[in-house]
Image (cartoon, rainbow, N blue to C red):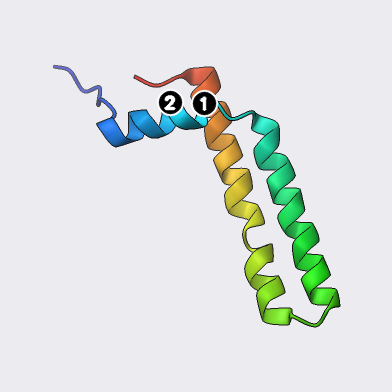
Amino acid sequence: MNDQKNEGKVAKEIENKTAVIPSDVFLWTSIASMGVSLTLKLFGKDKLALFVGQWSSPFLLMGVYNKIVKTEGSD
């Protein structure tokens, strides 16, 4: 019995596109979003600062995904 699942076309295409991006890009994008958030906070744009600051975690998560795809590959 073959229990192994194969990736769909969309997932494979996403992996192919993201594997080209250097891992540092995700780290620096995350740090940049924190910096922009701090700047917005200092200028009194509290709601926008919170919104932009929340981007940091997804950027880091995409970086982890990117690293896994690069090291482990896909189907």
Above or below for 52 versus 33? below
Side of 6 relative to 64 (left or right): left
- Tell me if I can see residue 54 in this picture: yes
Residue 35 position, x and y percent, is 80, 59
Residue 28 position, x and y percent, is 74, 43
Q: Nearer the viewer, residue 44 or 65?
A: 44
The quarter of the displayed image where residue 20 is located: top right
Q: Which residue is mark 1?
A: 19
The residue depicted at 76 percent of the width and 50 percent of the height is 31
Above or below for 18 versus 40? above
Q: Where does the C terminus fall, quadrant-wise?
A: top left
Q: What is the three-letter code of the residue carrying label 2?
A: Asn
Q: Which residue is mark 2?
A: 16
Side of 58 relative to 41 (left or right): left
Q: Where does the N terminus fall, quadrant-wise?
A: top left
Residue 66 position, x and y percent, is 54, 32
As helix, strand or loop, the secondary structure at mark 2 comes to helix
Residues at marks 1 and 2, CA–CA distance in whole angstroms: 5 Å
- Tell me if I can see residue 8 in this picture: no
Q: Are marks 1 and 2 in contact (CB under 8 Å)?
A: yes
